[in-house]
Amino acid sequence: MSRPPVDPDLAAVTAALLAAGATFVVIGGFAVIANDFVRATEDVDFLIPDDDANDRALDAALAALDARWLAPERPYAAGDLAGREHRRLWTHAGLVDELREIHGGLPIDPLPGLDSWHSRSMLRRFAIFLNVTYSPSHGSRPART
């Protein structure tokens, strides 16, 4: 059964993750948009730590979002995250892309107001974001009004 297109609903996805007590960092298109760049996105992307307790919280959040695998289409089941670095699922709040943190990066001090894991994740993604965004072939940052 094919799913009708659903615009990604960042508020609904993050509300489900927060209600379940999950640890995550929003990345991808919505992170770019939050930094005042114009960008379309078809899904909600987030980075998650490699942590069994967090996997259980994510399972609860995905159950609340009625998550389903895309191909072959089937319901998402608790424990499906085990051993996966990436998963892309359809939910009633649109497509969701989860990427697991890859270990081995350099340790950094936390940013103000954030714990160490969130800081490392944000800095890694922000560094990649800067490399892509400020290359001449991708244009420049729009002026703030």
Image (cartoon, rainbow, N blue to C red):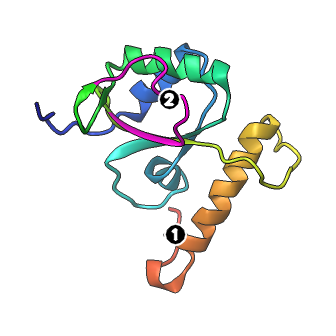
Drawn side of residue 136 relative to residue 8, left or right: right
Seen as rendered, the residue at the extreme left is: 1
**Residue 122: image location, x then y, percent:** 68, 49
**129 w.r.t. 97: above or below:** below
Marks 2 & 1, CB-CB < 8 Å contact: no
Q: Is residue 83 magenta?
A: yes
Tell me the residue at 53%/71% (across/down): 133
Residue that carries the numbered disc 1 in the rendered image: 143
Task: Tell me how far mark 2 sits from mark 1, CA to CA.
Answer: 41 Å
Helix, strand or loop for disc 2 = loop
Q: Name the residue furthest front.
A: 83
- Residue at 58% x, 23% y is 55
- Residue 131 or residue 79, whichever sits in front: 79
The residue shown at (39%, 15%) is: 63
Residue 84 included in the magenta stretch of the image: yes
| Residue closest to the eye, 88 or 13 | 88
Quadrant containing the N terminus in the rendered view: top left
SS under mark 1: loop
Q: Which residue is mark 2?
A: 81
Q: Is residue 11 left or right of residue 107?
A: left
Left or right relative to 51: residue 4: left
* Residue type, mark 2 in image: Leu
Which residue sits furthest right? 109
Amino acid type indicated by mark 1 = Ala
Q: Position of residue 89 (x, y in %)?
A: 34, 34
Q: For marks 2 and 1, give the one nearer the viewer.
A: 2
Q: Is residue 123 above or below residue 74?
A: below
Magenta stretch, main secondary structure class: loop
| Residue 138 in picture, x, y percent from top left | 45, 77
Q: Residues within 10 Å of mark 2 (few under 14, many from 20)?
A: some
User: Magenta span covers which residues?
Assistant: 75-89
How many discs mark residues in the rendered view? 2
